[in-house]
Image (cartoon, rainbow, N blue to C red):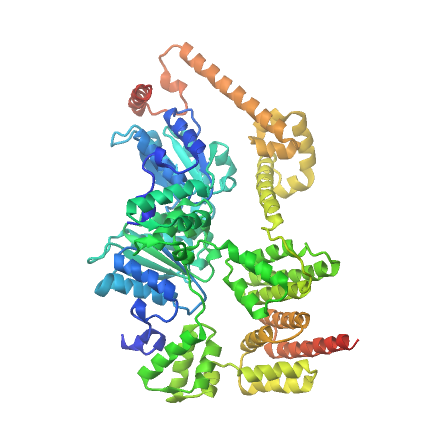
Amino acid sequence: MEDIHGIWIEKYRPLRLADMVGHRDIVERLQSYVNRGSLPHLLFTGSPGVGKTTAAVALARELFGEDWRMNFRELNASDERGIDVVRNQIKQFARTSPMGNASFKILFLDEADALTTDAQAALRRTMENYAESCRFILSCNYSTKIIDPIQSRCALYRFRPLTSDDVKEEVRRIAALEGITVTPKAGDAIVYVAQGDMRKAINALQGAAVVTQNITEEQIYEISAAAKPEEIASLLTLSLSGDFEGAERHLSSLIRERGIAPNELLSQCYRHLVAMELDRMLKVELIDHIGEADFRISEGAQGDLQMEAMIARFVLSALRQRGIDQH
Amino acid sequence: MDWVEKYRPKTLADVIGNQSAVHELLEWGKGWTIQKKPLLLYGKPGIGKTSAAYALARDLGWEIIELNASDQRTKGVIERIAGSSSTTASLSGALRRLILLDEADNLEGNADRGGAKAIVDIIKKSRQPILLIANDAYGVAPEIRRLCDQVQFRAVPARTLAPHLKFICATEGLDCDADAIRIIAEEAQGDIRSAVNMLFGSAVGKDRISHSDIRVHQKDSRSSIFDMVAKTLSGSTDDNSLIMLSREVDDTPDAQIQWLESAVIQHREVWRRTLSLCYLSRADSYLGRTFSRQYYTLWRYASAIMLIGTSAASAGSGLRVKISPPDRWKRMGLARRQKTIRLSLLNRCSQAYHVPEKTVSDEYLTPIALLADASPDRFVRALNLDADQLALLIHDKARASAILKEIEKQDKEEEKRKAAQKVAMPKLPEEEMDTSHRDTVEKTPEKKKTEAQSTLFSF
């Protein structure tokens, strides 16, 4: 198992519910299932990296103790999303009786929203027929993609994105255990790149720790191939002031010298724009430019060219806005 | 044990709500003869359809055999299980075997190839009662639907649900305040199972629940979409909070656009209305891109444009907006139903006349409609249409259902006449008379059984 422990997200995955960061209300309820030794079917929703899998595994560990692996099975629905997986694999696991002292098993179905509607329909009766011997924990990003009959069979838990404090707390804990130092600014950088996703945060931390024991802001941005917030801010300011040459130079240094992918830049620009104080109609127009570039790149257009064109449109929109204001 | 199973009704008398549907079901079961059509129970999830079917079987002492979408429903499997049980007597000595086809609206797809046809065959051949269960009656293949009588189960109103929840609390020795019960009953939106689950989820590990314990368990929070529309239209909420809010709302962005649309058209000023609609349309085209490319990153642009855009267009309007579910949903529901009917009609014509469906729709529909109008009963018989399909052709709902009723009556009389003839005939070559069933060995015990039953049920 040593090789898995090499990856920090596994090494530091909380083993007990009480060790989880954030989600106090949810953890408290899950804990009470453990205390009673009973469990309904559960549906976890929330964006990636907020602790859905961790909660499921911790729940199984606490319910089953040593034997947890025998009575817990994890399936990722996005790998196998057809109806056959429900009819074969899931049924197979659900209908055999639990091992050891456990009174039921747990099937954890990750990314259940990737299951086809047919497969979900098949799942719903399986859940009911084998409820005696097997409880289901479904996890998904959007609960609306889970068909109503299944939602109606589950207790729904909505995991909110983790707060900056949650992320910082976990980073501090791991840093202490690994004997590395993280400057406060680096902590902020981790929060910025992670956007509430603990998995991203820990990966950034581990990536930086491979290089040095004293982690700084720069290393975090470098390792996660992201631009610094200030760099994005100045890119936007330059374009909005109408300085196309300046903005273009800045852009090409980010792409060519720093090697930041256009997709990442688009995401960062989007986040900054939304938060910016700006005339709202102009803001919507600029967001539309980002979206258009994103769409074209996803269609196979060249990233560099589309990024430049986006900057050019920014400049044009800003100039036109200024013209309107002067009138 | 989880409470949904624990408090599943054991007899029909325990079923919550849907009194008339339950009554209809019981009457059907009590008076079941081989001539009776199967029943199709349909309605939203979690309102007691499957429970009612099991309770019926228990009340009448019938054995139950269930087939559902989680079993493989290819033709062979269905015939092996249901086909045999419908023509042979039960080993355990139960009076009858009730064949339950759950999720009858989920027969689509390759994995169930031939499933619909097999079910039609079974219904026609079966000598045992059959119940079909579906969420959407129109999701059931039309050839199956036509062979069934339909019974609708309705969402259970909160005032019916609340006493049941109270009963559970009392049985479990749980102290639950009236507000909590009320919230659960309302949030469940008529879904009993979801209500019981919510109660169970909030109650675990506690001796008493108050309304504050319920929040995390809501199936779907309608309040937040109202909140989102109101805050967007106010024009004074900052953009980041709007986007956060829209993420918290459980409705997907495409639904959100429609909620916003039905709000912004209430603006008095033309420029506000038009500008908002421009933004919504732009957002909508991003959604289209998202879905057609399966590239979900594009979702955020749709959200940002619709929220920030309509917010900008609405700022300072002082509009007291009336927020309600999009009007077009009702219309779309209707349109969808019309569309399925139309498709089934086209399919039928296309098969009958050996012409592609598209050609029927483009060129033949008008003459067919005229012919159907002239002699509707002949058309119904020739194409085996139902009332909805006929109504679509002759544009007259009342007349169509009257014609269908008349035809049914004629058919029954015809059957009676035939039966009377059969009795009048000399008794000897019985198996030759009954072409549908040639198995003489099986026939005799089966006959006796029916007699035994009729005495049992005559009390």
> Relative to B19, is A4 on the left or the right?
left
Q: Where is B88 relative to A257, above or below? A: above
Residue B250 coordinates in the image, percent (x, y): 50, 58
Residue at point 33% right, 75% down?
A: A12
Q: Quadrant of residue B307?
A: bottom right
Residue at point 48% right, 31% down?
A: B147
Residue B360 coordinates in the image, percent (x, y): 65, 39
Residue at point 45% right, 84% down?
A: A220
> Relative to A188, is B256 on the left or the right?
right
| Residue A74 seen in the current view | no
Q: Quadrant of residue A201?
A: bottom left
Residue A72 coordinates in the image, percent (x, y): 29, 61
Q: Quadrant of residue A256?
A: bottom right
| Residue A25 seen in the current view | yes
Quick one: B459 or B113, which is closer to the camera? B459
Quarter the C terminus of chain A occupies: bottom right
Q: Where is B224 relative to B452, above or below? A: below
> Relative to B457, is A238 on the left or the right?
right
Quick one: B29 or B206, which is closer to the camera? B206
Residue A137 coordinates in the image, percent (x, y): 36, 58
